[in-house]
């Protein structure tokens, strides 16, 4: 009976290289081949839309401040995570995220479903001084967010940049009409680049996210972003059997 000595593989560079490439090839085929047997890997769910100009600027600030290094936005399909955070994350929920905020390394809790969980006032206080609302928190203070006016002069350019990677912000009437069909008239207005600055100001003033209507701060934008996370999909209308075929 043939006995293979592992030492002969480790001491033979050529054989080790061939064995490594063979293992990688088999592993790659096992992961990639099934994708050719399904039409799509992204669930078809209603409600997911691109971020509004204000929400998108809030997301930019979230990334700028490094929030993603301590908070993931991906609830894995494990019972303990679903009990704590809610329904596991769907690929469709991140279809307009560039870059996405997936991950499993968490110093703070996952934020995939934080939208609507707390009031605007709670978020403002938590960002200014986290320990004042969560005594055991190790999160640093971000008091400058409420003191810093939001720069939205280039919000249109930022949205045009996202168009190049597939986010359907509109610039023409035809694109606007398509967004009306896809997302509804109320959302389509927010996605129209020529009106980006006006829409941003309107949402900030109506939402009053930082509690001060006299100006628009970076806090307004960041809280607007946090409050939309996980709120787009109505999971009471999503049947598990409709999702399983995309796994």
Image: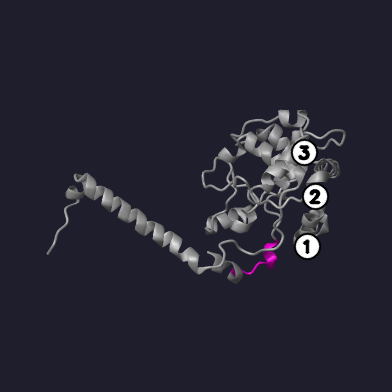
**Magenta region, residue range:** 234-240
Q: Is residue 140 left or right of residue 54?
A: left
Secondary structure of the residue carrying tag 3 is: helix
Q: Residue at x 32, y 52 (%)?
A: 21
Q: Residues within 10 Å of mark 1 (few under 14, many from 20)?
A: few
Image point (76%, 51%), residue name: 170
> At numbered mark 2, what does the secondary structure look like: helix, strand or loop?
helix
Residue 93's quadrant in the figure? bottom right
Instruction: State left or right for residue 38 relative to residue 55.
Output: left
Mark sitting earlier along the chain (3/2):
2
48 vs 12, left or right, is right
Residue behind mark 3: 220
Task: For marks 1 and 3, give the one nearer the viewer.
Answer: 1
Q: Earlier in the sequence, mark 1 or mark 2?
A: 1
Q: Is residue 133 visible?
A: no
Q: Is residue 239 shown in magenta? A: yes
Query: In terms of secondary structure, where does tag 1 sit?
Result: helix
> Where residue 111 sits: x, y (%)?
63, 47
Q: Which mark is residue 181?
A: 1
Q: Nearer the viewer, residue 110 or 13?
A: 13
Residue 129 or residue 29, whichever sits in front? 29
Look at 81% across and 35% down and name the residue there. Answer: 216
Q: Quadrant of residue 200?
A: top right
Q: At which x and y percent is residue 173?
A: 82, 54
Gap between marks 1 and 2 measured at Cα: 14 Å
Q: Report the Cα–Cα distance between label 1 and label 3.
A: 29 Å
Q: Please state if 180 lies on the left or on the right of 96 as rendered.
A: right
On the image, numbered disc 2 is attached to which residue? 190
Q: Residues within 10 Å of mark 3 (few under 14, many from 20)?
A: many
């Amino acid at each position: 009976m043939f006995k293979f000595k592992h030492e002969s593989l480790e001491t033979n560079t050529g054989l080790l290289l061939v064995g490594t490439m063979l293992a990688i090839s088999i592993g790659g085929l096992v992961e990639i081949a099934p994708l050719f047997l399904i039409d799509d890997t992204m669930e078809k769910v209603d409600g997911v839309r691109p971020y509004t100009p204000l929400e998108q600027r809030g997301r930019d600030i979230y990334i700028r401040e490094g929030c993603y290094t301590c908070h993931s936005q991906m609830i894995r399909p494990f019972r303990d995570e679903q009990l704590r955070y809610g329904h596991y994350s769907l690929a469709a929920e991140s279809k307009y995220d560039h870059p996405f905020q997936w991950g499993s390394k968490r110093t703070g809790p996952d934020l995939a479903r934080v939208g609507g969980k707390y009031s605007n006032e709670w978020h403002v206080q938590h960002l200014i001084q986290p320990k004042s609302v969560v005594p055991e928190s190790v999160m640093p203070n971000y008091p400058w967010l409420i003191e810093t006016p939001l720069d939205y002069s280039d919000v249109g350019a930022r949205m045009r940049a996202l168009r190049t990677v597939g986010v359907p912000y509109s610039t023409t009437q035809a694109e606007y009409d398509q967004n009306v069909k896809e997302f509804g008239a109320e959302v389509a207005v927010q996605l129209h680049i020529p009106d980006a600055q006006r829409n941003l100001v309107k949402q900030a003033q109506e939402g009053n996210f930082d509690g001060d209507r006299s100006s628009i701060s970076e806090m307004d934008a960041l809280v607007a972003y946090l409050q939309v996370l996980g709120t787009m999909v109505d999971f009471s209308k999503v049947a598990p059997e409709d999702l399983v075929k995309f796994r």
